[in-house]
Image (spheres, helix red, strand yellow):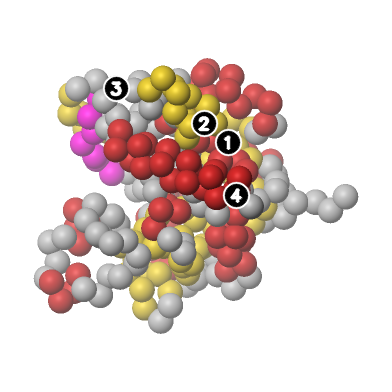
Amino acid sequence: MRKARTASVIFAAGYGSRIKDYSGNKILLPLVPGSDPYRGEYPIFSEIMKNLPTGPKALVVHHRKEEVIDATRDLGVFYCDQPVPNGTGGALIAAKGFLEDIDQEDLIITMGDVPFVKASTYRNLIRHLNYQDLVVLGFKPRDRAQYGVLEIENEAVKRIIEWRYWREYPGEMQSRFEISNSGIYAANRAILLEYLERLKQIPHQVEKERDGRIVVVEEYFITDLVELLNNDGLTVGFALAEQEHEVLGIDTHEDLMVAQSIFAKKDREVKRL
């Protein structure tokens, strides 16, 4: 039996504080609603798992982790505990043990609240690892507001610039940023492991809402890897999602309603075939 070439890490640790009427973990939200949008069937993680490449998978858990583990225990996934919710970089650092234990060299890093990335899109990301060390899944949104953008030179990603920074740039400079960051990546596992310790040296102070209060927390950003690799002469590239809804993240009640509508339409199309 041929060994799988690709491993995957799914970030599933966050609070999801912007969905005011839901206190559970977002990966457990249903794509098929029942009595209300938060109760139903076919949780988000089922669609993500269906589309990820074959190979070992790790869920990074924190918020309501016992419920996540109980719901996914039959999937054969590994669990990596993120002791505190300290950002996407912190989630990746929490997965270090998993990354050290596996021997697959190709790695997908994806978000537990982004259910519609196609299997072919993940495969395309992995293909880019034949000639790049880190690959960002980008997309072209109708409205770039709130998204980080890719600063690209000669088809290489030089930086990922968060919205709160690039919105202050002059209009002429802003117009150069056509591709936004989905938060999904492919990476060479060995190279990634080399940079985790360096990532830990770059904490950021971030304001977050916790239980109705704004607090300042220390976070690590996976996007910092782009500049770290570039500074050392490594290559960072990008691939494009075909459609914006592929990278829809479920951050709000409205996002969930849109996702459930998209899934219902997909389900009807499949049944017609």
The Cα atoms of the two marked residues, 4 and 2, are separated by: 23 Å
**135 left or right of 140?**
right
Q: The disc labelled 2 sits on which kind of residue?
A: Pro
**Residue 21 shows which numbered tag?**
3
Q: Is residue 205 magenta?
A: yes
The Cα atoms of the two marked residues, 2 and 1, are separated by: 6 Å
240 up-or-down from 94: above or below = below
Answer yes or no: do the residues labelled 3 and 1 have beta carbons within 8 Å? no
Q: The disc labelled 4 sits on which kind of residue?
A: Arg
Q: The disc labelled 1 sits on which kind of residue?
A: Ser
Q: Is residue 69 magenta?
A: no
Instruction: Name the residue carrying label 4.
Output: 272
163 up-or-down from 131: above or below = above
Between disc 4 and disc 3, whose residue precedes? 3
> Which SS does the magenta portion mostly show?
strand
**44 or 183, which is in the foreground?**
44
Which circle, 4 or 3, is nearer the viewer?
4
The Cα atoms of the two marked residues, 4 and 1, are separated by: 22 Å
